[in-house]
Image (tube, grey):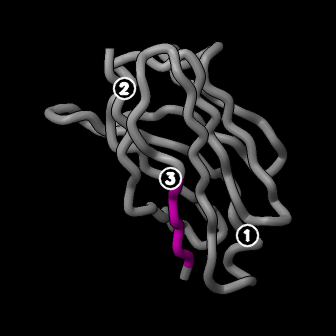
Amino acid sequence: QVQLVESGGGSVQAGGSLRLSCAASGNIFTISRINAMGWYRQAPGNQRELVATITSGGNTNYADSVKGRFTISRDNAKNTAYLQMNSLNSEDTAVYYCNAVITLISRNYWGQGTQVTVSS
């Protein structure tokens, strides 16, 4: 079993920055098999959408809406993923969820979510 705990959310003014962290814990053997980690977000009334993903090898993928503003990174030794968010705007307001995928056992894990609120 894998638990994901997000931190770093909060309120910021437009143009500001926040850094989210997602720490994976649980069975060491299972954690070591995490392939991709990612961030998704869900605004009120909207479906959950992809923000960014990163593989264990460091390959990244971003939603068009955040390219050039957000950077995903990963510390495999700490089993932690990060999302650096710059030039935030009101459309970035959402609950941000961490995700981890283990293809070996076809499992998909989610964190509890962290609120990001951007005021104009």
The residue drawn where x is 14% and y is 33% is: 45
The residue drawn where x is 56% and y is 27% is: 17
User: Which percent across, then down, holds residue 3?
Assistant: 52, 74
First of labels 3, 1 by sequence position: 1
Between residue 11 and residue 6, name the one nearer to us.
Answer: 11
First of labels 2, 1 by sequence position: 1
User: Which percent across, then down, holds residue 62?
Assistant: 59, 25
The residue under label 1 is 33
Cα–Cα span, label 3 and label 1: 16 Å
Cα–Cα span, label 2 and label 3: 19 Å
The residue under label 2 is 118
Label 3 SS? strand
Residue 89 location, quadrant: top left
**Label 1 crowd bin: few (<14), some (14–19), many (20+), radius 10 Å:** some
The residue drawn where x is 59% and y is 57% is: 22
Q: Residue furthest left?
A: 45
Label 1 SS? loop
Instruction: Check whether the beta carbons of the residues at disc 2 and disc 1 lie within 8 A of each other.
Output: no
The residue under label 3 is 98
Compared to 81, does 33 lie above or below?
below
